[in-house]
Image (spheres, grey):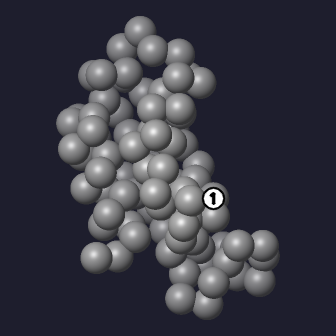
């Protein structure tokens, strides 16, 4: 399974979002630290989830980082988050 698909599946399972976009931005970072020729190293996640209601921006980020701990420890070098309730 591709990293992008794994991220999407884990976030769907953990947060049941109303809206979810997982965008591979690796091509913007070619030649930079952490970039690999095959890509799938830099992602942007846009997610709207009711479970974020009343949760601070910092805590939302922590929850997503927890859900994606294996990916962040391995193939993912950078993760930009846009999270809303």
Side of 52 relative to 56 (left or right): left
Instruction: Assign the N terminus to one quadrant of the image.
Output: bottom left
Side of 63 relative to 61 (left or right): left
| Residue 71 seen in the current view | yes
The picture places residue 38, in percent across and down from the top left corner, at 53, 88
The residue sitting at the right extreme is 32
| Residue found 67% across the figure and 77% down from its top | 35
| Within-10-Å neighbours for mark 1: few <14, some 14–19, many 20+ | some
Instruction: Give the secondary structure at mark 1.
Output: strand
| Residue found 29% across the figure and 51% down from its top | 10
Side of 69 relative to 8 (left or right): right
| Residue found 71% across the figure and 73% down from its top | 34
The quadrant holding residue 31 is bottom right
The picture places residue 85, in percent across and down from the top left corner, at 37, 22
Q: Foreground: 33 or 19? A: 33
The quadrant holding residue 6 is bottom left
The picture places residue 60, in percent across and down from the top left corner, at 48, 27
Q: Is residue 16 above or below residue 85?
A: below
The residue sitting at the bottom extreme is 37
The picture places residue 62, in percent across and down from the top left corner, at 53, 32
| Residue 43 seen in the current view | no
Residue underneath mark 1: 78
Q: Is residue 50 above or below residue 66?
A: above
Q: Is residue 36 above or below residue 50?
A: below
């Amino acid at each position: 399974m591709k990293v992008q698909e794994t991220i999407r599946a884990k976030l769907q399972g953990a947060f049941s979002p109303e809206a979810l976009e997982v965008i591979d931005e690796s091509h913007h970072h070619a030649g930079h630290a952490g970039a690999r020729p095959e890509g799938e190293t830099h992602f942007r996640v846009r997610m709207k989830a009711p479970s974020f209601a009343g949760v601070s921006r910092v805590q939302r980020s922590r929850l997503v980082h927890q859900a994606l701990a294996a990916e962040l420890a391995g193939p993912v070098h950078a993760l930009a988050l846009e999270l809303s309730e």
